Image (spheres, helix red, strand yellow):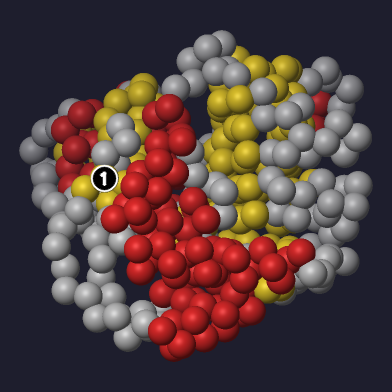
């Protein structure tokens, strides 16, 4: 399931089919799940579509050893629908709605046939892959994707990121390699630990949910929301891993691990919901996010400016709006050269409009 970042936060409420897909796949948090249930209760035809796809997928999965990608099945169904019911899930449990003209071309037998077809399309042995070879999932600039692994673990892949799943996964080798950023909700198996490799870091699950984020300086940040992980520098040989518990953040950089206990909040996972939120974030982290989410190369050549941190949040803002807010927050001027944005100390000779 992928989601494209919208260019403007001022647009009308949209149908949040991605939220519905996550709920069907069992990947929603409590707030989102409740909001989707409330919306579906008010839209019985859409609820019937969701229920039928889910039922067909469950039925097919129970009859074989293959895994069914329910989200992809639902996406295939709705691609056959020319309808625009409105649903927007917001934090705090609210559901916003707006009137819309709906053309129900999928009623009756045609709807059932489309749903069955989509469910069958969604059947694949691990998304059509071969369990004997590595599986690779990659997202484009501005897109997220959620991946359900065969062991029941789920991964939300950030824009511009790449996840490689080891061959023989779920057969004793639960190892993945990450470039970029991702949120992992791991199904614990004490006999077969879940291990994430990322730029010299090894993150070993001890039954948990956590995010991993890499930046332009080779920094690997791990934020734990539930359970425990062990963070280790693989280049350090026999160095003991650092244990991170719920609420802890560990940052591996230049061969050392810095730990901040109890600092992780819900904002650290806001990007999984399409929002970028920063709290005293280093500019290297912001640079990596702008590249992944907007395709922008942000350069900071001034040494003093490069040491500043950013506290801000963005949801659906355009690239120009994001850059302007960052420049104002840092007290910088902006010079644009194509897709490259240069931040420099304020003063004459710079162009303030990207």
Quickly name the residue at label 1.
95
Q: Examine the rendered structure and indicate whether residue 55 appears above or below residue 343.
A: below
Element under disc 1: strand
Residue 37 seen:
yes
Left or right relative to 193: residue 337: left
Residue at 30 percent across and 26 percent down: it is 311
| Relative image position of residue 20 (x, y in whole percent) | 43, 56
Q: Position of residue 280 (x, y in %)?
A: 36, 22
Indicate whether 289 appears above or below 251. below
Furthest-bottom residue in view?
A: 110
Where, by quadrant of the figure, is residue 147 drawn? bottom right
What is the residue that sits farthest to the left in this orientation? 348
From the viewer's side, name the closer residue of 88 and 49.
Answer: 49
Report the residue at 35% width, 63% height from top: 44
- Quadrant assignment, res 336: bottom left
Q: Horizontal and vertical percent for residue 314?
A: 27, 41
């Amino acid at each position: 399931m992928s989601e494209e970042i919208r260019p403007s936060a001022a647009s009308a409420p949209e149908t949040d089919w991605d939220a519905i897909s996550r709920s069907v796949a069992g990947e929603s948090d409590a707030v989102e799940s409740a909001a989707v249930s409330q919306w579906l209760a008010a839209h019985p035809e859409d609820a019937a579509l969701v229920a039928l796809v889910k039922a067909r997928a469950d039925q097919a999965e129970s009859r074989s050893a293959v895994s069914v990608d329910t989200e992809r099945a639902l996406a295939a169904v709705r691609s056959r629908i020319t309808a625009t019911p409105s649903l927007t899930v917001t934090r705090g449990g609210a559901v916003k709605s707006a009137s819309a003209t709906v053309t129900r071309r999928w009623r009756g037998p045609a709807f059932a046939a489309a749903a069955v077809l989509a469910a069958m399309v969604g059947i694949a042995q691990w998304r059509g892959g071969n369990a004997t070879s590595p599986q690779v999932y990659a997202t484009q600039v501005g897109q997220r994707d959620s991946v359900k692994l065969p062991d029941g673990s789920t991964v939300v892949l950030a824009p511009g990121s790449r996840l490689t799943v080891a061959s023989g996964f779920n057969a004793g080798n639960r190892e993945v390699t990450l470039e970029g950023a991702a949120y992992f909700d791991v199904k614990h198996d004490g006999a077969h630990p879940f291990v994430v490799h990322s730029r010299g870091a090894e993150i070993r699950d001890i039954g948990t949910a956590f995010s991993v984020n890499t930046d332009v300086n080779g920094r690997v940040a791990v934020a734990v929301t539930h359970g425990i992980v062990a963070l280790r520098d693989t280049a350090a040989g026999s160095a003991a891993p650092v244990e991170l518990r719920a609420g802890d953040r560990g940052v591996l950089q230049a061969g050392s691990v810095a730990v901040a206990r109890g600092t992780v909040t819900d904002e650290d996972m806001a990007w999984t919901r399409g929002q970028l939120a920063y709290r005293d974030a280093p500019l290297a982290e912001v640079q990596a996010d702008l590249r992944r989410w907007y395709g922008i190369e942000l350069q900071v050549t001034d040494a003093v400016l490069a040491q500043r941190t950013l506290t801000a949040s963005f949801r659906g803002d355009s690239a120009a709006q994001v850059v302007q807010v960052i420049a104002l927050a840092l007290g910088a001027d902006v010079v644009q050269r194509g897709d490259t944005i240069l931040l420099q100390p304020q003063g004459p000779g710079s162009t303030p409009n990207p």
